[in-house]
Amino acid sequence: MPTIEIYDPPMCCSSGVCGPEPDPQLIRFSADLDWLRRQGSEVRRYNLVQEPAAFAANIEVKKLLESADGDGLPVVVVDGKVMGHGSYPSRSELAQWAGVPDTGEVEDAHTDLESGLVTPVVTELIAIGAAIASNCETCFKHHYNQARKLGVSKDDMIQAVNIALQVKDAPAQAMVQLAQKYLVPGGAASGSCCGEASSGCCG
């Protein structure tokens, strides 16, 4: 499957689903990306506040931002090609770009989502997961309290936390594998950016 990259506008956390009143559009989009990952797609997401280097490194995204005076976000890139910008795509569009075969089920699922699948309970569970993924203690406490008021069980909250941890740990595991590739005997030659000839990417 193709790699899908999302270049988000400045947000307080990696998904934007945090704070007392998260944007319903961001909640919907985060759920769509989670669904896409479960289909086996590789999804990468970059926040302009947290990862500005990723925006500068992608020539097409950089050109788009410069031509739009910074108003072109979010940008969706599929295998290096800009597929959309300025708004978040629908689940059916993501499915088409990812090459998910059963588009009929995808469209039905998206219709169900728009018709009320994201209830206040689901919203708080998503927000709890986002708080874990973004290491936002204040966000977690707020959404934990909101979920309790709605009668959400601790088991459901634990499941949301566990899912968030799995998503959060995936990049860390990828970095461990990269380090092993470079460090184990017979691995790839070091391409350190922090050597003597480096301009100083590590400080």
Image (tube, rainbow, N blue to C red):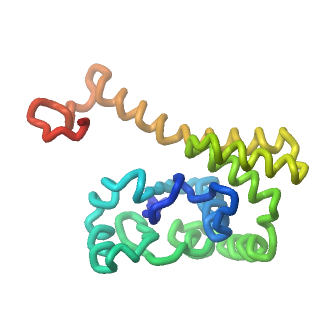
Which residue is at the far top? 185
In x, y percent, where is residue 126?
70, 54
In x, y percent, where is residue 115?
79, 76
Which residue is at the far left? 197
In x, y percent, where is residue 135?
57, 41
For the image shown, how many numbered marks are present on the structure?
0
Res. 2 in view: no
Image position of 48 (left or right of 117): left
The quadrant of the picture occupied by the C terminus is top left
- In percent of the image, x 45 and y 62: which residue is there? 10
- In percent of the image, x 45 and y 65: which residue is there? 9
- In percent of the image, x 43 and y 63: which residue is there? 7
- In percent of the image, x 36 and y 34: which residue is there? 178
In x, y percent, where is residue 102?
66, 70
In this rendered view, identify the residue nearer to me: 170 or 129: 129
60 vs 129: above or below: below
Image position of 198 (left or right of 202): left
Q: Quadrant of residue 190?
A: top left
In this rendered view, identify the residue nearer to me: 93 or 186: 93
In this rendered view, identify the residue nearer to me: 203 or 158: 203
195 vs 18: above or below: above
Q: Quadrant of residue 168?
A: top right
Image position of 192 (left or right of 93): left
